[in-house]
Amino acid sequence: MLIFHTIPAGTVICSVCSGTLELQDNSLICKSRHCFDIAKQGYVNFLLQAPKEKYDKRLFQSRARVSQAGVFRGLTDRLGEIVRNELERQRGELVQQKVVPPSLGQSPGERQHTTVAILDAGCGEGSHLSALVRHLAGTSGCKLVAAGIDISKAGIQLAAKANPGMLWGVADLAKCPFANGSFDIILNILSPANYSEFHRMLADDGLVMKVIPGTEYLQEIRRALHSETGRRTYSNDRTIELFRRHFELVDMQQVKYELLIEQKDWADLLQMTPLAWQAGEEQLRLMQAMNKQPVITFDFVILIGRKRYKR
């Protein structure tokens, strides 16, 4: 629960009335007395009613194990580089403006605070955010406050258990429990987005980074399981165009690599990808048996955007 003492005042808001939530004992409470209890695992459920779970605990456990095996390290390392470069850019601007002295240990940010707030919207079990924070630890010259939200309670429970030093919440991306301009960085990794909410929560000088599959992402699995369907190939053109409508696309980077997947990770990889969800059990069993150590392509595109009026 100590993480809630480190969150800047006014950051977390009520899902009912949008009033500011304040920590009282083991709950977050607004002035209208709407109350959201902090679970013993350390997360908060901001939903007003339980949704039908689309993803189960097994999927998130599989993704956590795949992440621990280093499958997404190439992606999270690149995200870390982008964030670190952005923090250095902001600091350079402030030094030129003489807003802050050019001494080590000072924090960048237009709001002159000592923290940089990062939100992973649609974080699942939190593996990507956790890896990014580890990448940035001790290198950015600032204090990080990291938060992750997802509509899946199962995913957030796993995230909170594995990463107690971060703020985790069960929440709908259509009604995020954070105040306007709360975050310097908003991540949206291989997940649906709500761009109006992202725009609202993003600081004026902030970055939104959306990660989408590249055209060759998991192409070996796609071809094996969807050779006779329209899902044999993939295009992300519509997703990129939708992003452009809401944010100024300042950069677009590809991260692509091939990995030899160990047998112990193969079943988890199939379990976590939507490409395999509609495949029959026998089809999956045969695919696992035929591919003892397959080489799989990981192809990502990172869309980096800013609010349009910020130049």
Image (cartoon, rainbow, N blue to C red):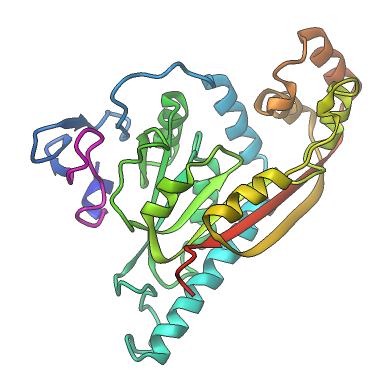
Q: Is residue 93 left or right of residue 67?
A: left
Whether residue 51 is situated above or below residue 221 in the rendered picture: above
The x and y percentages for residue 71 are 70, 43
Whether residue 267 is situated above or below residue 194 in the rendered picture: above
The x and y percentages for residue 46 are 30, 32
The part of the image, by quadrant, that contains residue 209 is bottom right
Residue at figure coordinates x 14%, y 31% from the top left:
34
User: Considering the image in quadrants, where does the N terminus appear?
Assistant: top left
The x and y percentages for residue 38 are 24, 32
Question: Is residue 165 part of the magenta span, yes or no?
Answer: no
Q: Is residue 292 left or right of residue 205?
A: right
Q: Is residue 92 left or right of residue 23?
A: right
Residue at figure coordinates x 16%, y 34% from the top left:
26
Quick check: can you spot residue 88? yes
Q: Magenta part of the protein: which range?
A: 7-21
Residue at figure coordinates x 79%, y 28% from the top left:
263
Question: Is residue 10 part of the magenta span, yes or no?
Answer: yes
Question: In this view of the protein, which residue sits in the foreground, 271 or 226?
Answer: 226
Q: Can you name the residue that lies furthest to the front here?
A: 245
